[in-house]
Image (cartoon, rainbow, N blue to C red):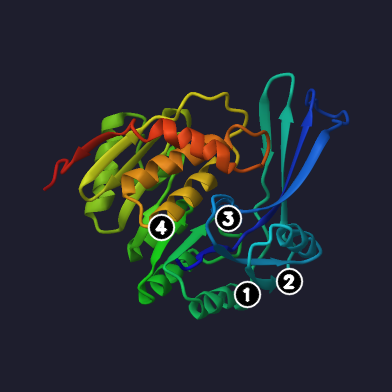
Amino acid sequence: MKAIVTLTINPAIDGAAETERIQPIRKNRTSHERYYPGGGGINVARVIEELGGKALAVYLTGGVTGPLFDGLFERTGIPARRIPVEDDTRISHVVFERSTGLEYRFVPEGPNIQEPEWRASLEVLDSLDFDFLVASGSLPPAGPLDFYPMVAELVRNKGAKLVLDTSGAALQRALDRGVFMIKPNLGEFEALVRKSAYDVSVQEREVQGLIRSGAVEIVALTMGRSGALLATKDMLVRLAPPPVEAKSAVGAGDSFVGAMTLALARGRDVRDAFAYAVAAGTAATLSVGTELCKRPEVERLYSLLRNGLTFRKDIDRP
């Protein structure tokens, strides 16, 4: 199996810490500080490697914070192709408040990426040989909204599959070109279809509409504790996560995407890959802060889920 390539145009140094109580004005002393290389595609690459797969991460970093990110990522041992940029790589921070169990997330928008820099990432992708590309994360402020559509066209020309995890106009424009799989959360999905989607019937109707439009082959809609919904041209699968004591939702979406892409790349059935992804997303919630899923927990939860699928075939076909 070829390495799964991941693309992160807006990576982040992810810091995490804990404090007893967050108060305004006063100094909030923290403990258990941890730092990780983050950003959607970077996290997906880490998950793929954790689950026994092979990944190649393509990412853009630079400025005074870029070397710190590069050093953190080198510790993972994951092969990478780095594209240097002039502006500073962003630093995100998550603080867990022990007295309430609440988590506070501070996420900068990211550096100003110049056209020669983002075009260099496309040139790197064009030089690689892959069957699956995962493009994940937000665009930086100066990133063009048609960047992901350009990635989609590049991937299609290679005869490969694009898994896209982003939101807003960047997602909508990419769908106009056609992608293999998307994984919106509920808020992102509502923005995409431009309507409230808390109702189950609305969710099912709208995901099927996306499939029928030809814009995407697989839609995986994640809804936290409410589970996830999977749609393809001939199936609709809804799966609730196993009951766990969730500590943080950070990294759950990236764990889901990494696990599902790896399972599909290994030739596993789509429904089986979906169950594996839900297990990985759930496993990520067991850790505080920015840690991702761990393989032993993924396998344990997957064994609980594999027989719990609600499966319907040939739903409302026109």
Q: Residue at x 43, y 46 (%)?
A: 184
Q: Going from the N terminus, do you reach mark 4 or mark 2 first?
A: 2
Q: Do the residues labelled 1 and 2 touch (CB within 8 Å)?
A: yes
Identify which amino acid the numbered label 2 is placed on.
Answer: Glu
Residue indicated by mark 4: 266
Does 193 appear above or below 67? above
Does 284 appear above or below 179? above
Residue 218 pos. (x, y %)? 32, 52
Closer to the eye: label 3 or 2: 3
Which secondary structure, mark 4? Answer: loop
Closer to the eye: label 4 or 2: 4
- Disc 2 crowd, CA 10 A, few/some/many (<14, 14-19, 20+): some
Residue 99 pos. (x, y %)? 74, 19
Q: Is residue 266 left or right of residue 280?
A: left
Q: Residue at x 73, y 34 (%)?
A: 95
Q: Going from the N terminus, do you reach mark 3 or mark 4 first?
A: 3
Residue indicated by mark 3: 49
Residue indicated by mark 2: 86
Q: Residue 117 carries which label?
A: 1
Q: Going from the N terminus, do you reach mark 3 or mark 2 first?
A: 3
Q: Going from the N terminus, do you reach mark 1 or mark 2 first?
A: 2
Q: Residue at x 45, y 66 (%)?
A: 1
Closer to the eye: label 3 or 1: 3
- Splitting the image into 4 quarters, where does residue 174 fall? bottom left
Q: Nearer the viewer, residue 172 or 10?
A: 10
- Disc 3 crowd, CA 10 A, few/some/many (<14, 14-19, 20+): many
- Quote the CA–CA distance across marks 3 and 4: 14 Å
